[in-house]
Image (cartoon, rainbow, N blue to C red):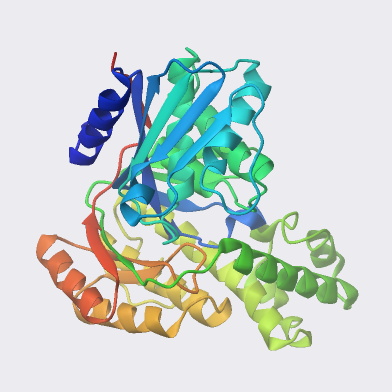
Amino acid sequence: MQLNQLAKRLCERAKAENGNILCLSSAPARVDFLNTHQDYKMLPVVPVAIEKRTFTVCSRISEPDTVRVKSLSLEREGVESEDVFKSSKVELREGKWFGNYFRSLHMLISRKYGKIITGLAIYVDSEIPVASGLASSAALHVSLAAMYMRLLNLSLSKMELAELAYEAEHDIMGIPCGRLDQYSSSYGGVIKIEFKPVLSIEEFNGEGIRFVVADSGIRHSTAEIHPVRQKELNNAIKILREAQLPEKLRKILSGDYASVDWRLLKEEDLENYLNILPRKLADRILFTLRMQKTTETALEILKYRRVRETSLEELGLKPTGDWLEALGEIVNMQHVFLRDLYEVSHPKLEKMRNAALEAGALGVKISGAGMGGSLLALVRGDEDASRVERAFMDAGATSVFTTGIGEGVSSIPTS
């Protein structure tokens, strides 16, 4: 793990206050590259880890049965930044208390492994903007999981670390998240996460891929967006099931949005039946099918670094032999689906996106749940990146940065 200035300052702070450092861990942010809003439908998703990271450092303290937590990023903001809890009796606090991220992981480790760590001070700092669609909470949980693994001498795989982080956020904290964020932060790089028939990870070559990431400054919670779209999908499935469908389609559409095997459905199979749905519900079905189809093409391009002669024509896109340009075209198409068929864009996002495209971005789309948060722009090189950065800022972005592909979770002893 290469220590940047933020990590060095974090270590210096912990050592100055406690006289020792036990270990340093870090995990990356991610952008939601392909097949956004599909993980809760058990369809594959393609996140990309980026070069912004969250760092955690821990020290031994002479206070039995005590864990002290300090967030340096919250301290800089002038808000409450410390938490203290008893190691042997940990409970979550009510509301959106930042310390619950630490408490939840501590509770899970104690239950799962029957081990309690006492007399510990944990310091955290992050380069990742909070609530910007870059998975800051997952990076924190993954980094903490790696820290506990180091402290308890556990030998855990990247998948096991990701599951710990997921269980802490989903099961303990009750946040309705999927696994996309935790797995991306743990593995790093460019990955495809498959959920059926079993959870599996495929890693892709990320060489040549660069993004400009722009924060709109607009905040929306995933919990405000996902349940609404999930309910709409269930309503659409119910209406279709009650229609005079062929038995094959009726069988595929049994169950809810998460149990339907969407990959068995083709748009042409449903074209005679979608008109019985309200327009909004039909759009939600079309979104699901079209996002999956374009993702399959993008993954083929990403894997082989070449473009089949007919692959873009099949999507209604202009043919090109340039694999990066082809990816950009698919990124643009997926944003249009998110905007027009899933309705999770925002006028400010559209203004920023148009400016970035005019400045030379190959493709620009929402990263995350949408209705705010961040946009990712696929760019070819540093000159294009600089132009796109300026365009984003001129269009109202609150922050912007260029990034390559980030490494996965890391933990090193420092004592």
Residue at (57, 76) in percent of width and height? 342
Does any portion of residue 49 appear in the rendered image? no
Give above or below for 410 relative to 200: above
Left or right of 316 on screen, residue 324:
left
* Position in image of residue 99 (x %, y %): 52, 42
- Quadrant into which the C terminus falls: top left
Depth check, front residue: 353 or 250: 353
Residue at (50, 21) in percent of width and height? 156
Does any portion of residue 223 appear in the rendered image? yes
Depth check, front residue: 308 or 221: 221
- Quadrant into which the N terminus falls: top left
Furthest-left residue in view? 383
* Position in image of residue 401 (x %, y %): 23, 60
Give above or below for 71 relative to 291: above
Give above or below for 181 relative to 348: above
Name the image quarter holding residue 39: bottom right
